[in-house]
Image (cartoon, grey):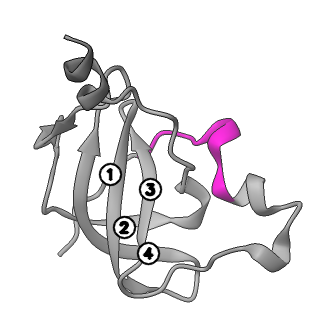
Amino acid sequence: MHKHIEWDQPGDKSVLRYFADHPDDFPEPHVGSIISGLYKGATVRVRVEARLDDGTNIGDVVALIASADGKRQQSLGDLSVGDTVRLPDSARALEPGHPQADDEEAED
């Protein structure tokens, strides 16, 4: 069973919006693809286990990445790494540039 998530609206990071100008280049997810959505401001990476005819992807959360510092988290609100979720194409988002924790450590 999957966990119901209220995804953030992707806005200008929308995958569908980005590929509207390039429909031939739209990468339709398949089993094993890693896709992204936004939840409570964080980036959520999902490994696709199934794709439904209506453009909904079902898969496991493989990463939660904080938008402020790019650090990975094990959980955020009701969502945890390992949870099975439904991520419709309408909620898919291009990943924002995250600050790299490794870069900050290298400067110290």
* Mark 4 lies on residue: 57
Residue indicated by mark 2: 86
- The residue positioned farthest toward the front in the image shown: 107
Mark 4 and mark 1 lie on one chain; the one further toward the N terminus is 1
Mark 3 secondary-structure assignment: strand
Quadrant in which the C terminus is drawn = top left
Query: Looking at the image, is 71 positioned above or below residue 22?
Result: above
Name the residue type under label 1.
Ile
Q: Is the residue 19 above or below the residue 72 in the image?
A: below
- From mark 3 to mark 2, how far is it between C-alphas? 11 Å
Earlier-in-chain disc, 4 versus 3: 3
First to last magenta residue range: 7-15
Residue pictured at 16% horizontal, 42% vertical: 78
Q: Nearer the viewer, mark 1 or mark 3?
A: 3
Left or right: residue 72 versus residue 89 is left
Disc 2 and disc 1 in contact, CB within 8 angstroms:
yes
Q: Amino acid at mark 2?
A: Arg
Residue located beneath label 3 in the image: 36
Q: Which mark is residue 5?
A: 1
The numbered mark, 2 or 1, whose residue comes first in the sequence reads 1
Q: Residues within 10 Å of mark 2 (few under 14, many from 20)?
A: many
